[in-house]
Structure formats: C-alpha cells, structure tokens
Image: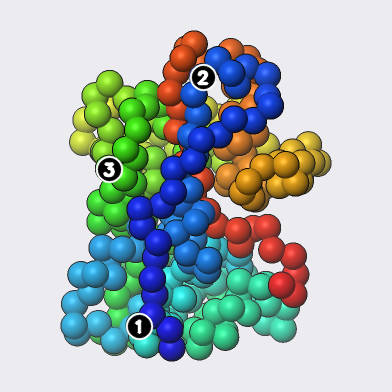
C-alpha cells in the first residue's frame, strides 16, 4: 500500500497557442491534471474534505458511476491507499468486458456491483440509500461524481492558489459542483465561464444554482457539448489529437478537450475583451481517453 500524496498547489502555466485571436488576451492554465498521476485532480479536490473528516465509525465507502467514471477511479484509489473497503455501484454490466478503469478498481480490491439503468436511476432516492446502508453496515455513501456539498470547499481552494490577477476563469460543467466551488472562491470583479459538456440548457444552470445561495458572476455556454456527454465527433477527436502533439500538456475529449475547443472558437469569434486575463482550468481526468486494455 502506498501513501497518497497529491501535489498541491497545482502548477499555473502561461498558455500561448498559435490560434486566431489568442494574442488579444492573456491566458494561463491551472494544471489540476498534474495533481496526481492516477487520481483525477478535480475529483481529489472534491473528495478532500470528505476523506479528511471521515468519522471513525465508517467501515466502508459506497459510490456510483459509469464504467469510465473519473470519480469511481479516484475514490477507488484513495480507499485502497487508506485500506478502506470500497463498493462501486456501476451503471451497466461489464462482467468479463471490464473497462481499463474497472480493471484498476479490481486491482485495488474494490467490490464492483453492476446494476441496470432502472436501479441506477434510484441513486438519489432515500429508500434505495437506506437499503444500501443496511446492505453495507456503517458505510459512507458518496453521491455520484463526488458532488456532495463539502466538495465545494476543496474546489474553491484552487482559486486561492492562483497568485496572478485574472478576470475570467473557464471550466467544464457536468454535475455543476466544480463551477459552483470556483464561483464561491471568486472576487466580485471576477467571472466564471462554464463550458457545458452535456446537453443541458437550463438544467446545468439549476445544478450550479442549487449549491449557491445568491446570484454570482457566472454563466454557462451550451454551444460546445459536441452532441452530448462523452460524444466524440471526428472534429473533436482531430482537435484533441493535434493539441496533444503540439502543446506541453494533454487533453481528452470528454472534459478538457471540449473546454479547449470552446476556447479556440471563442477566441476566433472575438468573445473576450482586449487584454482580458483568462485562466483555463484543466480538471484532469483521462479515463475517457484510455484505449482498451491500457
Ligand atoms: C467530473 C469531472 C468534471 C465535471 O465536474 P462537475 O463538478 O461534475 O461539473 C470535469 N472534469 C473532469 C476531468 C472530471 O472528472
């Protein structure tokens, strides 16, 4: 068993791509992908306080996700390093056809429970959660994506780490906790721009708002989900492949690929003020980019 050592604060690096409109603004990338080689940075920030404040009575952890979930992967690794039994409730049956992510979980001695769509749908229902509590005595149930309310504290810390002045921070949005956590850490003069990575106009806004108690400086653009969650049209694949051969860090098509693709388009459209100081959050998470058997 190895100790878990996240590298914090994560690096902040200048970003100067040879893209149309790029020289009108100043850009830096907050490299949460560099926090840990296995655990996705974004997911570690979400789990940090849940793990730090784990009641001593907790005997196992239960959580939910798909077969390529960065969250299950991060939590599975952390539980393994803590020697804490982990139950992963996985949407779909991958028996005998495990994804690379699920193979990692097995390697870390996680217990995989494959459930069908209908059962997975119940993951927020009180009755189902009570049933899990009975099945796994003294367990702690972490919601899908690690998006429990104390996740926001861990996320907002990334704003405190940024020691350069900036106007706008750009980040992907799926469950909304990341954007909400960032917004909580912003000064009143700063803005957050979320890139919706799934089809959810109105819905994604409601997810973010539920974590925030008043109007703050943020908005979400829905122009770059590229067809929906984890959808990878050829133009997006090509963009990511070219990016990965020419830039000093890698992106994947599910989250960071859509963020940088959006950035390229927005720069081209002149969507930013001249001289605007932009931070792009690289949330990490390369589970969606791993070839089978890797
Ligand atoms: C889960 C995840 C996100 C989405 O964060 P939300 O808080 O669910 O909006 C973004 N990037 C990566 C790499 C992730 O794993």
Give the labeled residue for mark 2.
25
Of the numbered discs in the image, which one, if any, rests on residue 173?
none
Q: Earlier in the sequence, mark 3 or mark 2?
A: 2
Labels 3, 1: front one:
3
Between 274 and 287, the one lying in front of the other is 274
- Residue 124 appears in the picture as rendered: no
State yes or no: Cβ of the residue under disc 2 lies below 8 Å from any atom of ligand 1: no
Residue at screen point 55% across, 57% down: 285
Residue at screen point 50% across, 29% down: 27
Give the labeled residue for mark 1.
82
Image quadrant where one finds the N terminus: bottom left
User: Residue 276 is drawn in which quadrant?
Assistant: top left
Task: Count every numbered label the image shows and give the total.
Answer: 3
- Element on which disc 1 rests: helix
Labels 2, 1: front one:
2
State yes or no: Cβ of the residue under disc 1 lies below 8 Å from any atom of ligand 1: no
What is the x, y in percent for residue 237?
76, 44
Of the numbered discs in the image, which one, if any, rests on residue 160?
3
Question: In the picture provided, is 88 more to the left or to the right than 292?
Answer: left
Residue at screen point 40% across, 61% down: 7
- Element on which disc 3 rests: helix
Question: In the picture provided, is 116 more to the left or to the right than 146?
Answer: right
Question: In the picture provided, is 223 more to the left or to the right than 219?
Answer: right
In the rendered view, tell whether residue 66 sits above or below residue 62: above
- Element on which disc 2 rests: loop
Question: In the picture provided, is 253 more to the left or to the right than 222?
Answer: right
Between 102 and 206, the one lying in front of the other is 102
What is the x, y in percent for residue 271?
54, 15
Q: Residues within 10 Å of mark 2 (few under 14, many from 20)?
A: some
- Residue 279 appears in the picture as rendered: yes
């Amino acid at each position: 068993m190895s100790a878990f050592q996240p590298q914090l604060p994560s690096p902040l690096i200048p970003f100067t791509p040879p893209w149309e409109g790029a020289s009108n603004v100043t850009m830096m990338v907050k490299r949460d992908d560099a926090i840990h080689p296995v655990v996705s940075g974004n997911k570690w920030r979400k789990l940090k306080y849940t793990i730090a404040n784990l009641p001593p009575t907790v005997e196992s952890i239960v959580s939910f996700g798909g077969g390529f979930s960065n969250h299950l992967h991060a939590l599975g690794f952390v539980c393994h390093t803590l020697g804490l039994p982990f139950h992963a409730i996985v949407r779909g049956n991958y028996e005998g056809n495990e994804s690379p992510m699920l193979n990692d979980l097995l390697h870390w001695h996680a217990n995989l429970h494959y459930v069908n769509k209908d059962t997975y749908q119940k993951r927020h229902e009180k009755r189902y959660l009570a049933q899990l509590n009975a099945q796994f005595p003294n367990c702690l149930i972490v919601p899908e994506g690690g998006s429990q309310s104390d996740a926001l504290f861990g996320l907002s810390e990334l704003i405190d780490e940024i020691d350069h002045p900036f106007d706008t921070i750009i980040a992907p949005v799926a469950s909304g906790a990341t954007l909400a956590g960032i917004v909580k850490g912003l000064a009143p003069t700063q803005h957050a721009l979320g890139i919706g990575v799934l089809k959810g106009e109105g819905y994604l806004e409601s997810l973010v708002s539920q974590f925030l108690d008043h109007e703050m400086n943020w908005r979400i653009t829905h122009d770059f989900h590229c067809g929906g969650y984890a959808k990878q049209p050829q133009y997006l694949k090509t963009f990511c492949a070219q990016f990965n051969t020419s830039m000093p860090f890698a992106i994947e098509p599910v989250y960071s690929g859509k963020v940088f693709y959006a950035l390229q388009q927005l720069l081209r459209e002149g969507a930013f003020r001249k001289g605007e100081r932009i931070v792009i959050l690289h949330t990490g998470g390369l589970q969606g980019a791993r070839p089978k058997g890797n």
